[in-house]
Image: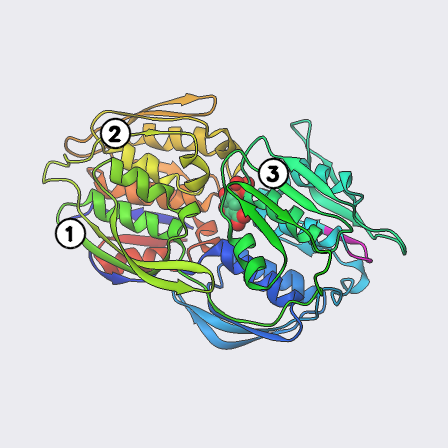
Amino acid sequence: MDFVVRPASRPLRGVVRVPSDKSIGHRAVMFAALAEGTSTIRRFSFGEDNVSTLRCFEAMGVAHEVVDAPVFPKGGRIRVHGLGLFGLKMPVDGRPLDCGNSGTTMRLLSGLLAAQAFGSTLVGDASLSKRPMRRVLEPLRARGAHCRGAPHPKKDDETAPIRIAPLIEGEFLGPSEIELAVASAQVKSALLLSGLYAHGVTVVKEPTLSRDHTERMLELAGVPLRRVGSLVELDPAGWDGCIAPFDLTVPGDPSAAAFLVVAANLVEGSVVRIVDVGVNPTRTGALDVLRAMSAGAQIVPKGEEGAEPIATLDAMGAVDANGVGMVAANVGGELVPRAVDDPILCVAAACAKGTTVIRDAAELRVKESDRLAVMAEVLRAFGVEARELPDGLEIVGKPQGKLRAATVDAHDDHRIAMSAAVLALRADGESRVRGVDNVATSFPGFARVLTDLGAEILETP
Ligand code: S3P
């Protein structure tokens, strides 16, 4: 499927929702599966990645019901019948668990399954089967897990399929103390989940704090956790091993909202309100960068859902009739993990005055695509000067007038597809983004939401 996008001919206006947070959705299903009884998850996004997690647990005996069928982008309500910490069952006939396109499903499940008394295999689609997995498997092996990935076809690494052999009777995972070279919520969470079952303490230290949804849920569940800055320590000694069932409303995904914020910023006169968005500070790096660019959104706090702060975002046009108004920014350091899912910032940079420099972001090369290379390719196709750095990008903004309409390939990457569609609003004619099917992994209903706001974007087979 392709997006065909016409240049914005009028301001974007309206009050909208985005799908609920993908990261929190995965974790909500996992904790509900491990809880002793039935949990309710409201506004579950039903994005394909979250559904992959749900299906994996279904295959391990965790039943769920759809109480309210999904309406996109609002999501739906599910009830998950948890089996307790030791209740997961071996998938029937040892069938592989299919993580689809979802790196979070594969990495977090590796941690959880490494501690089980049954063996399992994790598989994924072509894109996931190229992503590096040693970062989780090695520290899990170091604490006694029997897990191994397939040799990576291109690098000295491991990838899917991941095979996990059971812990035999009398075998336990041991303590784990690790200092990560690169902040990673997925690695941290895999270790914490395995740590629920370990004989000994789990300590993870990150260079700067990555998203902390797992820690917040563990704390809510009463698991003994100690946190100081970017260090987290889990010591299950003395814990009763019981996770109580819960009723959780998943907040809107801030990384999905960022596409709409930038779209509003780039179209003169726009006024867009996005309601019920998660604003956990480990996720708001993009809003901070946009503010430094004289753009972004006003954040109106609206309390908490679960242990997560939520807010209304009010975004407006940040440019005048000639497209001028936004300024370049420097992005690096602790901002990067806080904006790691926001390549849309490159689109803002493409329309800002001056050169935006992004550093410390080599991780973007191992996401659903090599986002530094692919983003540079997309920007150049629209006539924007972009230079790849080993760990980032230099983008020379073109604030004046229109960009050149283009046909670009999304490289099967949902966030590249949506970034390119937003950039196309500033082009001088109709643009086409090829291969956008994966948008459904994180933002089902994206084209419809943009259309509701007044953009002209068609999905074509
Ligand atoms: C995620 C963590 C991040 C992020 C991914 C979701 C999570 O990955 O890019 O989309 O839910 O834990 P890393 O842990 O690799 O930084």
Q: Secondary structure at mark 3?
A: loop
Pick whichever, 142 or 390, lies toward us.
142
Residue 432 showing in the rendered view: no
Q: Secondary structure at mark 1?
A: loop
Q: Is residue 453 above or below residue 428?
A: below
* Image position, residue 134 (x, y; %): 68, 36
Residue 11 has which mark? 1
Which residue is pictured at 81% across the width and 62% down the height?
A: 93
Q: Earlier in the sequence, mark 2 or mark 1?
A: 1
Amino acid residing under circle 1: Pro
Which residue is pictured at 19% across the width and 35% down the height?
A: 326
The secondary structure that dominates the magenta segment is loop
Q: Which residues are magenta?
A: 116-121
Place residue 95 in its image quadrant.
bottom right
Left or right placement of residue 298 versus residue 408 in this view: left
Residue 328 has which mark? 2
Q: Does 118 appear in magenta?
A: yes
Amino acid residing under circle 3: Arg
Please name the colour scheme applied to the rendered image.
rainbow
Q: Are marks 3 and 2 in contact (CB under 8 Å)?
A: no
Q: Secondary structure at mark 2?
A: loop
Place residue 29 in its image quadrant.
bottom right
**Outermost left residue:** 321
Residue denoted by label 3: 131
* Image position, residue 282 (x, y; %): 44, 46
Pick whichever, 438 or 302, lies toward us.
302
- Circle 3 residues within 10 Å: few <14, some 14–19, many ≥20: many
**Outermost front residue:** 238
Amino acid residing under circle 2: Ala
Disc 2 to disc 1, how far (Cα)?
A: 23 Å
